[in-house]
Amino acid sequence: MDLSERELVQKSKNGDLDAFERLVSLYEKKVFTLVYRYTGNWADAHDLAQETFLKVYQSLPALREDGSFAAWLGQIAANVCRDELRKKRKHPKVSLDEMMSSSGGVPLPALSAGCPESALEQWEMSEAVQEILNSLTDEYRLILVMREIQGMSYDEIAAALDISPGTVKSRLSRARQAFKQKVLARRNFFNLSRV
């Protein structure tokens, strides 16, 4: 029997852990992608995705009946990411992955059964895009991830970030421009003749 998202939320509010697990399974990839693209680190993303769902479960009673679960979840994930970045600024630490990268021991991606060269190129491109995302301000990175990677609507982003849709549009425009400038600065890597 398939339950609607609203029914799963209501059952979860009433303490039904199975219903909450189903909600998690519906949104875990989206949340992980959001926090990974925001942090740029797999280990942090895994931890922050778990923290997000823990906060969601603890805060379920506060979710309004007429509220969008997806937008509310996005808001919690964004807040968890912002909190983590604030902590990192106060107490910087280096992850094992970062130590391996700086010492030349870059972990390779899991290669597909198809063409290893193509998989490696795709991984390198993904890493380059992540580096550019990491170099953007937190505000720009978050809004780009929400819109371009998560595919959230302007209204969903506005609700998640507690800003107006007009502010979403203007920030997104500035974020896209900043991203484009950084891509153009690496024109050779991205094989761009001119844009």
Image: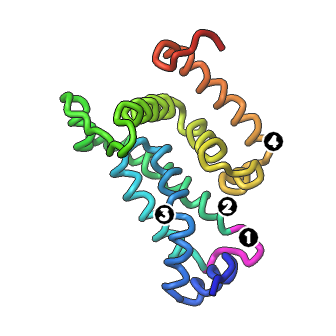
Q: What number is the disc on residue 71?
A: 2
Which residue is outermost to the top? 193
Mark 3 and mark 2 lie on one chain; the one further toward the N terminus is: 3
Quarter of the rendering containing residue 193: top right
CA distance for labels 2 and 1: 8 Å
Q: Secondary structure at mark 3?
A: helix
The N terminus - image quarter: bottom right
Report if the CB atoms under discs 1 and 3 are less than 8 Å apart.
Answer: no
Report if the CB atoms under discs 4 and 1 are less than 8 Å apart.
Answer: no
CA distance for labels 4 and 1: 20 Å
On the image, the x and y values in percent for residue 175 come to: 64, 31
Q: Is residue 65 inside the magenta stretch?
A: yes
Vertical placement of residue 91 versus 59, above or below: above
The figure's colour scheme reads: rainbow
Q: Is residue 148 inside the magenta stretch?
A: no
Amino acid found under the numbered disc labelled 4? Gly
Mark 4 and mark 3 lie on one chain; the one further toward the N terminus is: 3
Residue range corresponding to the magenta coloring: 61-68
Q: Residues within 10 Å of mark 1 (few under 14, many from 20)?
A: few
The residue carrying mark 3 is 52
Nearer to us in this view, 153 or 77: 153
CA distance for labels 3 and 2: 13 Å
Amino acid found under the numbered disc labelled 1? Gly
